[in-house]
Amino acid sequence: MIAKRQRWIENTVRELLDNLLKNKDQSSAWYEVERLLIKEALEKTGGNQVQAAKILGISRNTLRKRTQKYGFLKEVKIVNP
């Protein structure tokens, strides 16, 4: 399970960076990668912050602060994991 999750994260980051760096500077690309990874993790876990934080390798408190920073917690579409 961990290896599958790690591959998903690596592939997602590579794809996002490739697409973002074509048109943006690195700082805005990093912002977008982080925002999209957090959003995707929350969607995959049905909005469960503890599980999403575990997937991302950060604490729930850090995840909560970053969702507030990016201002999208309420817009996350919950899907069946």
Image (cartoon, rainbow, N blue to C red):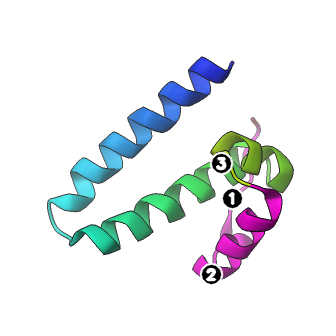
| Nearer to us in this view, 74 or 4 | 4
CA distance for labels 1 and 3: 11 Å
Q: Is residue 48 visible?
A: no
Which residue is drawn at the image coordinates 65% and 72% (left, top)?
66
Range of residues picked out in magenta: 59-80
CA distance for labels 2 and 3: 16 Å
Vertical placement of 58 versus 73: above or below? above
Q: Identify the mark at residue 41; answer none if there is no mark.
A: 3
Q: Element type at marker 2?
A: helix
Task: Say whether residue 30 is left or right of residue 79.
Answer: left
Quadrant for the C terminus, please. Answer: top right
Magenta region includes residue 78: yes
Q: Residues within 10 Å of mark 2 (few under 14, many from 20)?
A: few
Question: Which quadrant of the view contains residue 5?
Answer: top right
In the image, residue 42 lies at what x, y percent? 71, 53
Q: Are marks 2 and 1 in contact (CB under 8 Å)?
A: no
- Identify the amino acid type marked 2: Lys
Q: Main secondary structure of the magenta part?
A: helix
Whichever of callouts 2 and 3 sits on the residue coming sooner in the sequence is 3
Q: Element type at marker 3?
A: helix
Q: Is residue 17 visible?
A: yes
Which residue is drawn at the image coordinates 42% and 40% (left, top)?
12
Which of pointers 2 and 3 indicates the residue nearer the eye?
A: 2
Q: Which residue was labeled with disc 1?
A: 77
